[in-house]
Image (spheres, helix red, strand yellow):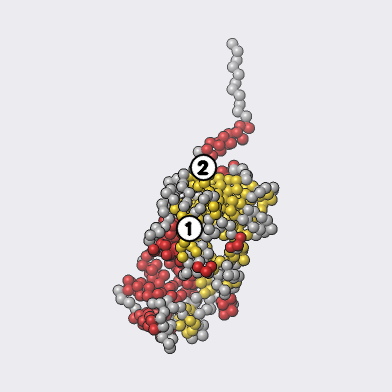
Amino acid sequence: MRRRRPPKKIHKFYYLFIFPITIIIILYAADMITPLFKSALLKSSESVAIPIGKHTTRALEAGFIFTAGAKAYLEPVQETARLEEQVMRETTYSYHIKVGKRAVGRLSLTLQEIDGENAIYFISCHAFPGEAAPATAKLTISGSAPPRVIRTIEYPGGIIDNRQSRWKEIKIGPLPCSLPRSLTFIESQDCSLALGMIDVFQDLGNGVIKELYHQSPAARVRTVKNETRYEIPLPGLPGTESRAWGVIALKPLVDWKNNTPVDRLRVADLNRFHKFWIDGVYYLTPESYVPSDPRGFWRCPAHHVGEAFLRTPGELTRALAISSMYAAIRTQNPSGYWPTTPKSNWLAEDYGFGPGFYDTRFNTDGAIFLLRAYQAFGEPQALNAAERYAAFLCSFARLHARKTPRSGYLVPDYMDARGRAETHTSLNHLVTEMNFLYELFLATGKEEYKAVAENIRLAVKDTRDGWIKPDGNLWYARLLDGRFGLQDYPTLTLNDLRLAQRWIQEIEGEPDPDFQILINTKTRYNRSHGLPL
């Protein structure tokens, strides 16, 4: 009887190489592998396709195809793991744009899923200094009828002014055709689109970017078989960043028969008056800022647009308010506030400030937005960020406020990057800080917020008569030498005082008589001079 051969031993090569590769292939096919490993398995190519449907609970038959310029290809950097927020899911894809072995730029796509049906996209093409890195993004939507009528914002006389702008309907001609070089709204039976302007920016430093409008291309729309395709060229000029954003929705983004959202969208003007981006809304730089340019933009921490959208019905305003909420949360610094990145010549001349200063009004407006966003969307991070700022504000007030006779807090308007805060105190800043702390107290019941608000209120009461000018108007600020001066706004401070009375009455059951005197004084002055009330 022959002896049976013993079974062959499995070579260790199987365990070291074949077995791990088999597991990776299985996990990849099952979509269970982590994004980092998935990215490692991706290969460089002239173009990449990214479906939008995989990021929504109710799939959209849509996606992006990105193509590098001539002789260039895209090399994946990484696929960021999804950020699962309370009311938003976010995924970012990043690629090097390479020619041969040389990186000439970077391309990224961030998708934010809102409510499982709407998607916001942000596309950035950054060309390195001295290198051209053009690319093209193609948004394809299957089964969607091509647009026939679009809406956009126009500026009479070419003057970019959100008070004079108006909506314009444009009939689309035979396809393919170019779209306007502006924020464009498109409605079809299958979906609704808001296509932001394709911007080209030059970095001027200190967080200021300059719009190069003459370099901004127009998007084009065409049909390919049963698809509607929107082609978004990204110029990739040396040392510039090309940006494009938009919103894709299954439901109509805007109720064009409702004047409230229609007017607020026009005034918000996320086209040429403001710039919307993943980290917030950018404002035109004042002439007093450094650097400054007639077409320069800086990111303002106040989030006035986001707060207005909280009060505006519609799919678009809800999506942009949610995106702005997370932008505010993510850009808050470790100390709890949001610096103004440019330098202010005014603050530099009067107080020796440099860039990166703390502005109490813009910051407090941003914190009010976060508090109200929490109340609207239930995102705990928004409340946490609002309270982090409140803790900073209370500490700032205790440390830097000048005391009135009854120990009221005259909180300075600004602090520089080094922590110096010897500046004037304006009435609108002061009252808004009090209003925020009262509103936060009502939302949380925490007495420490009410206590500091009471100290600020006491300062206004102690200095009441000093704010009133001989002509019946109000002074803007109490200066460092104790005098009152500077020109007040027509209605801003008045509205702040009226809101203060609302919170005071809600907390105490009756209005404050000193605040009412200031309100009555300003109201009489405005009425007698034909100013808004």
Q: Is tag 1's residue or tag 2's residue first in the polypeptide sequence?
A: 1
Residue 477 percent coordinates (x, y): 47, 81
State the residue position of label 1. 170
Q: Nearer the viewer, residue 227 or 320?
A: 227
Residue lying farthest left?
A: 509
| In the image, farthest residue toward the bottom | 470
Which residue is labeled 2 in the image? Answer: 225
On the image, the x and y values in percent for residue 139 come to 53, 49
Does residue 15 appear left or right of residue 427 in this picture?
Answer: right
Label 2 crowd bin: few (<14), some (14–19), many (20+), radius 10 Å? few
Residue at the image point whose x is 47% and y is 51% from the top: 147
Residue 82 drawn above or below residue 259? above
Amino acid type at image mark 2: Lys
For image coordinates 42% across by 76% down, the residue present is 491
Task: State the separation of the CA atoms marked 1 and 2.
Answer: 24 Å
Q: Circle 1 sits in a helix, a strand or a loop, which is it?
A: strand
Residue at 52% from the left image edge and 69% from the top image edge = 157
Q: In which quadrant of the rendered view does residue 451 lie?
A: bottom left
Q: Residue furthest front?
A: 174
Q: Which of the two marks, 1 or 2, is nearer to us in this view?
A: 1
Q: Please determine whether, in this image, residue 528 is positioned above or below residue 91.
A: below
Residue type, label 1? Ile
Q: Determine the secondary structure under disc 2.
A: loop
Q: How many marks?
A: 2
Residue 301 at x, y = what percent?
Answer: 50, 66
Horizontally, residue 66 falls left or right of residue 306, namely: right
Q: Can residue 527 be seen in this view?
A: yes
Residue 39 in percent (x, y) is at 58, 45
Q: Nearer the viewer, residue 461 or 195?
A: 195
